[in-house]
């Protein structure tokens, strides 16, 4: 359990409440105020829109009790405190993985992940940026794995990344619960935009099998494309995986094939071996590609 008790003696705290849409409001609260504690709790443990638990409702007195500000926890972006209040988050340690342990394939799928407006904006952005995409091969293919990956990528930009990252953050705790991943503090969330066109693929791999990537814990893939769908293939295959020691993993026979449906996101543990099957896109036109925003939540 998190200890969210402000770690300082009782004093007045200037609190700035940040809400969606860029709105902010200032109030002064004692450092031991239950309202302040509830605000901090709502930031640390956001309520997801599709969760059974309803969002928390806040009533903030303003202007000497002459007015009241009402908002739900879903609208709360953050809280600024002056002087600063530091909270102690007791996160369970992630247990060491014994060599030979088998990770059973498990994933969490959410359809209609983005609103129709956000989905369309993302698709429009991807199509407009066609000339900015780069080949993935030069960055990932090596002499040992000369044909490891073939696709196009556009690396992180807030123009597309922040929208998806914010939604991933909102789903974070639920994803850990669904996938039986021990809780961990988020240090960073990556996001990149990829396009798979005719003949493109990604051979078998996992997402944290190197010193550079060992902090990746939760992988996600968000699929989107133009309708009507102009390609086939491109399924994501996730395998039962056995850990062989340090960064060595091997796939086992059992696997699940996941169809890349429009506006669908998939979450899975980053250690699981997986691959993208070749895409068949007869037109070979960029606009007909299988697009994704994919990334990793790091500990």
Image (cartoon, rainbow, N blue to C red):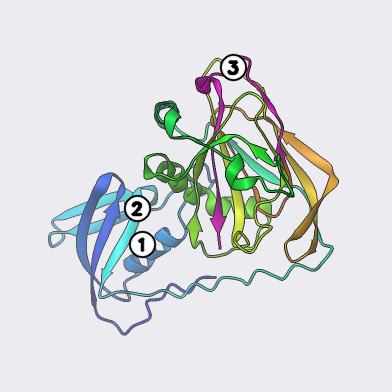
What residue appears at the point 45 percent right and 54 percent down from the top-left corner? Answer: 46
The quadrant the N terminus occupies is bottom right
**How many numbered marks are there?**
3
Percent x, y of residue 208: 65, 57
The quadrant the C terminus occupies is bottom right
Q: Are marks 2 and 3 in contact (CB under 8 Å)?
A: no
**Is 6 on the left-hand or right-hand side of 293?**
left
Calculate the distance from the C-alpha at mark 2 to the C-alpha at mark 1. 8 Å
The range drawn in magenta is: 275-299
Looking at this view, is 293 or 32 the one in front?
293
Return the mark for residue 230.
3
Percent x, y of residue 81: 27, 69
Q: Residues within 10 Å of mark 3 (few under 14, many from 20)?
A: some
What residue appears at the point 55 percent right and 59 percent down from the top-left corner? Answer: 298
Task: Give the farthest residue toward the front.
Answer: 143
Vertical arrangement, residue 106 with respect to residue 31, above or below = above
Q: Residues within 10 Å of mark 1 (few under 14, many from 20)?
A: some
Give residue 289's quadrant in the image: top right
Percent x, y of residue 48: 49, 47
Task: Give the farthest residue toward the bottom.
Answer: 9
Helix, strand or loop at label 3? It is: loop
Calculate the distance from the C-alpha at mark 1 to the C-alpha at mark 3. 47 Å
Q: Which residue is mark 2?
A: 76
What residue appears at the point 59 percent right and 43 percent down from the top-left corner? Answer: 138
Q: Residues within 10 Å of mark 2 (few under 14, many from 20)?
A: some
Helix, strand or loop at label 2? It is: strand
User: Sequence-wise, which precedes: disc 2 or disc 1?
Assistant: 1
Q: Which residue is mark 1?
A: 39
Q: Are marks 1 and 3 in contact (CB under 8 Å)?
A: no
């Amino acid at each position: 359990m998190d200890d969210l008790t402000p770690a300082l003696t009782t004093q007045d705290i200037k609190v700035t409440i940040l809400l969606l849409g860029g709105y902010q409001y200032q109030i002064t609260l004692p450092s031991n105020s239950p309202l302040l504690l509830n605000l901090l709790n709502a930031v640390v443990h956001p309520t997801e829109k599709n969760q059974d638990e309803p969002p928390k409702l806040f009533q903030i007195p303003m202007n000497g009790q002459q007015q009241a500000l009402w908002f739900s926890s879903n609208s709360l972006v953050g809280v600024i405190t002056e002087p600063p209040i530091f909270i102690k988050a007791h996160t369970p340690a992630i247990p060491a993985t014994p060599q030979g342990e088998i990770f059973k394939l498990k994933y969490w799928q959410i359809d209609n992940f983005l609103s129709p407006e956000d989905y369309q904006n993302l698709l429009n952005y991807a199509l407009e940026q066609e000339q900015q995409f780069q080949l993935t091969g030069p960055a990932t293919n090596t002499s040992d794995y000369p044909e490891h990956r073939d696709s196009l990528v556009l690396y992180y930009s807030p123009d597309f990344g922040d929208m998806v990252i914010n939604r991933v953050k909102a789903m974070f705790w639920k994803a850990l619960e669904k996938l039986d991943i021990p809780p961990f503090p988020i240090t960073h969330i990556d996001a990149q935009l990829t396009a798979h066109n005719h003949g493109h693929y990604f051979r078998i791999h996992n997402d944290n099998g190197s010193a550079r990537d060992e902090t990746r814990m939760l992988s996600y893939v968000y699929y989107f494309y133009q309708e009507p769908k102009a390609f086939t293939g491109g399924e994501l295959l996730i395998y039962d995986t056995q850990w062989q020691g340090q960064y060595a993993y091997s796939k086992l026979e059992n696997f699940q094939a996941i169809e890349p449906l429009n506006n669908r996101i998939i979450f899975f543990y980053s250690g699981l071996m997986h691959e993208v099957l070749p895409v068949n896109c007869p037109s070979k036109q960029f606009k007909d590609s299988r697009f994704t925003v994919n990334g990793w939540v790091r500990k």
